Structure formats: C-alpha cells, structure tokens
Image (spheres, rainbow, N blue to C red):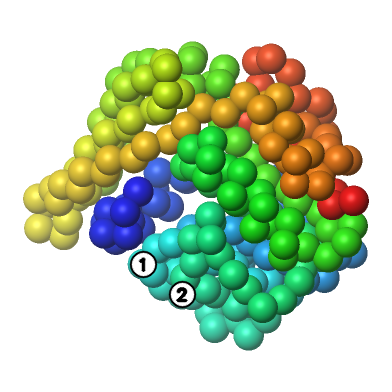
Amino acid sequence: MSNDSYKEFSQIYDLLMNDIDYNKWTDFIKEKLGKQNKILEAACGTGNITSILSENYKITAFDLSEDMLMKAYEKLDRNTGVKLLNQNMTDFKIDDKFDACICCCDGVNYLNEEEVLLFFQRVQKHLKDGGIFLFDISTDYKYETMFNDTYVYDDGEVFYVWENMIEEESKEVNVEINFFIKEKNEKYNRITEFQTQYIHMANEITSKLKSCGFNDIEIYDDYNNTEYFGNSLRAVFLCKLN
C-alpha cells in the first residue's frame, strides 16, 4: 500500500478495526513478554495497542504512514515513554537494541514472501540475545473461507462494501473497500481503499524464522492460550532469538 493511500485509510482505520478486543490482545502480549522493558512495535497503525502497552513498557513504535502516526500521537497524549518513527517494515533501522518486538493486526500479511524474510532479518538485528518476537498473521484458512465473498456493513453512520479477489498462484489477495461516511450535512463522503495482502502458511513462516535464528517457536490460536490448529483464523507466533 502506498503512503498516499494510507492518508485516507487512516481516517477510517479504527472504524474498520472496531471488532478487535485490544484489551484481550494486550493482556496476552503482556503475559508472554513478562518483565521485558524495551519494546519495538512494527506497523503500529493508529496506536491502539501502543497506547495500552505504554502503561507497562518503554515502547519505540514505527509505521509507514505519517497519517497513522499522527493519530497514534493523539491517542498517546504526548506520552514521553513512547517514541514514534516513520519507517518501513523491510528496511527499518533504529540505533538501539530491544528486549522484544511485536507486530499485530496482520502487519505481516501486507508483505510478500521476500519481504517477510527481510522483515524477520531486520527484527533479528534489533533484538538483544534471548529477545522475544511476537506477531500475528491471518491464516490461509481465514482467507479461503472468509475472503471469497462480498461483505456489506451499515450502522447508520458508516456504510461500506468489501470485495476480495484471490490470486491462487501468487497467494495474493486484492481487496477493494468502498466507505460511505455520513457527514454533518447528512451527505455521505466516499473513500475507496485498495489493499494487497498475502497468504502465508504457518510452516513457511516457521522456516523463515528459523533461518533468522528464531528456534524456540510457539504458535497460538489467535490471542488465546490454546495451540494453533487447522481452522484457526489468526495464528500468533511467539519466538525467542537464540
């Protein structure tokens, strides 16, 4: 996704993600990170997870979109314990080492196979020995069962139509979302969002992690303390750098 498209997407991102239980997710993250102190957050978006975790950790968070970061800054209310940076997942460079790195909300699904490996390599370079890497992906099962239809959402204030097209050979998912947001004058403002996501298999992700030195790998079903299985909609990876 280009930086320009993120500008409009940042306006409706939180509306699109309003079904996520961020408190549940962050409770899981805090349990797995334990007493780690310095946390790096990749693809932080508008800072929903950042703002909650900032109560317990010293966080450096980055995102490709300056507009997303502006909204995150507003949520953080100038929290001096958080550093926000405008960087890319595949070539970010920060002059620091971290106890842990997290990447939530399908950030990895926006990377193709080559980019996933580049991201993992960058994470490895920014973690201390024994550092923890926690991230999630939407699974192949989710894409196959939930991304083959057109979805319509309407709550009176926001109306959107979500359409998907899956390219089987490239494992590429092309998404078009048309938002109609009700304005004060009762008229609707239309925002059209195009995204490309990629389907990644859990075993392929595991292989890439091991090639980057992450050998202690656990995979959970969503942000629950149960193991990932074939029908999981979201896989959460927890690994350590050995």
Q: Position of residue 150 (x, y in %)?
A: 30, 20
Q: In the rendered structure, are the residues bearing label 2 and label 1 in contact, judged by CB atoms less than 8 Å apart?
A: no
Look at 65% across and 15% down and name the residue there. Answer: 231
Q: Where is residue 61 in the image (x, y as percent from the top left)?
A: 59, 67
Look at 61% across and 44% down and name the residue there. Answer: 117
Residue at the spot of label 2: 74
State the CA–CA distance, disc 2 to disc 1: 11 Å
Residue at the spot of label 1: 67
Dot in front, 2 or 1: 1
Q: Is residue 179 visible?
A: no
* Front residue of 209 and 33: 209
* Front residue of 231 and 126: 126
- When asked about the image quadrant of residue 50, the answer is bottom right
Q: What element carries label 1?
A: helix
Query: Type of residue at label 1?
Result: Asp
178 left or right, relative to 132: left
Disc number for residue 242? none
- When asked about the image quadrant of residue 95, the answer is bottom right
Q: Earlier in the sequence, mark 2 or mark 1?
A: 1
9 left or right, relative to 58: left
18 left or right, relative to 155: right
Q: Where is residue 63 in the image (x, y as percent from the top left)?
A: 49, 63
Look at 39% across and 28% down and name the residue there. Answer: 173
* Front residue of 113 and 37: 113
* Front residue of 205 and 189: 205
User: As displayed, is residue 58 above or below residue 65?
Assistant: below
Look at 64% across and 58% down and name the residue there. Answer: 122
User: As displayed, is residue 208 above or below residue 100?
Assistant: above
Query: Type of residue at label 2?
Result: Glu
Q: What element carries label 2?
A: helix
Q: Where is residue 48 in the image (x, y as percent from the top left)?
A: 55, 59
187 left or right, relative to 77: left
